Image (cartoon, coloured by chain):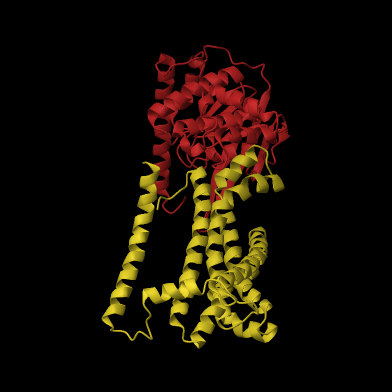
Chain colours: A yellow, B red
Amino acid sequence: MPRAKRVFDQVWPRAALVGAILLVWWAVYETGLIDPDKLPSPADVWNAFTSNLTGEDGLLPAARGSLIRLAFGLSVAVVVGTLIGFAMVASVVVQRSIGTLMTALQALPSIAWLPLAIVWFDFSERAVMFVVFIGGVPAVAIATAISIRQVPPTLTRAARTMGAKGWTLQRTVVLPACVPGYWTGLQQAWAVAWRALLAAEIIRVGAARGLGHLLESSTQDLDLSLIIAAMGVIVVIGLAIDYAFSVVDRRIRGKRGSLVPA
Amino acid sequence: MTPSRATLSIVPEPADRPVKLSVRGVRKSFTTGSGTRIAALEDVSFDVATGEFVCLIGPSGCGKSTILNLMAGLELPDEGQVLIDGRPIVEPGPDRALLFQDPALFPWLSVRQNVEYALRLTGLGPGETHDTADGWLAKVHLSAFADLQPHELSGGMRHRAALARALACQPDVLLADEPFGALDAQMREILQKELQLVWTELGNTFVFVTHNVREAVFLADRVIVLSARPGTPLEEYRISTPRPRSFEDVLVAKVVLDIHEHLAKEVERAAREEGLRPGLA
């Protein structure tokens, strides 16, 4: 299949969806069924988007603020979560204790930590980081442990009969073999962390501006167009990060012949 | 031991070759998921001479694979000993390569890198592995496919790659656990012929587990027939037909029939016994 055709096949359903949403939105707005104070027109939102892009309270600085927090909080969560995941595989005791704790934490929406975080850290950056961290760690830890446990035993057996053992076996077989599962885990963990971050920001936790803060301040100003524009930015950032993960995932799985066509 | 053995030994037994592997009074049992203990092997003893090609054959569940895993050092016997060059086998080692029904190639490495992986474990430096790996791949006719990923190969080619990787360890002993079991009949025959050629050239000691009688007789110097569970050697056939053999050889065909008959009787006996003792095994 020629490249142009492939790109087109990828793009048109998505473009059609955006078009359909805009069309329905615009039609509803034109009929006047909903009070224009409660539902701005697509054009209003577009204007709010373009005129609020930059500046101190703009969308771009807010997006930047949120992304920096995400990067920082998620990095710490990935490092700690990965180490916990390894420990869960290495020791049954850790699996039964910390492993259970990780499952328990996953059952708790990370936003539920906010009240405690605010009491402990006040409305500070540390409180935001804590919530992102506590949301990301269990996802990463569990994904790490599962991906290692799912390494096919035939591969480790083959390597052992060739004389690989101990750290060599772990480094040359177990680690490379668990990469696809681990990457899928990260893809889930970032989404958890991103949602936790925005929730914390909406409750005005953290000093610098983020997209969550912007949502909250435009609610105060009853600026619906800006609220919807900010939501749009959050969604677009989400899609972009997810796409970046998928590109790497396809590369990893494609090379191994374990790609599921989508 | 049996008349069939005497009539088939046209070439005298190579008694001068030293013993490579020795299984001495081995017992091994397993605990199933439901907690019952199942005896897989009972008092198994046999020797494999250096450079000998031995096939183990028997009804399914007779412990053939267990014997192989003991030789590989992946498992340890409950009783008795498995020796290589007179030393007990306690762990896997590069002196014994194992081939599985699943080629078990590393999917993140290219075909050549898979062979290089084995070479690196034998202590070769990073600069020396490339050409050596290509040499082994040439032996199994995979030179043109060295840069492909394993999933881009056909099933038969994957098995050849696994063979190249196993040979690259330059093991004293090759162990194979029904390596061609999942392939279609034509591909299996092609690979059996290739394996015969490669082995004739290299002459490693080979222990090959199969449930395919034709395959066993075609490849082996000696076929050991195991009983149904718990497995114990029932009978052995020495195949003296000179190599390269063909599947049409009269002698090969005759032995195949003999073993078939023997196995059928054994399966029938085991089934009857099991019928008399419901609830067991």
Image location of residue A243, percent across then percent down: 49, 58
Q: Is residue A37 above or below residue B226?
A: below
Tell me which residue sits at (50%, 66%) in the image.
Answer: A238
The one nearer the camera, A161 or B237, is A161
| Quadrant in which residue A75 is drawn | bottom right
Tell me which residue sits at (35%, 46%) in the image.
Answer: A5
The one nearer the camera, A54 or A69, is A54
Compared across the picture, whether B80 is left or right of A189 comes to right
Q: Is residue B1 visible?
A: no
The one nearer the camera, B152 or A210, is A210
Image location of residue A213, percent across then percent down: 56, 80
Tell me which residue sits at (44%, 76%) in the image.
Answer: A228
| Quadrant in which residue A97 is drawn | bottom right
Image location of residue B54, percent across then percent down: 56, 26
Compared across the picture, whether A25 is left or right of B51 comes to left
Direction left: furthest residue: A31
| Quadrant in which residue A92 is drawn | bottom right
Compared across the picture, whether A262 is left or right of A213 comes to left
In which quadrant will I find the N terminus of chain B? Answer: top right
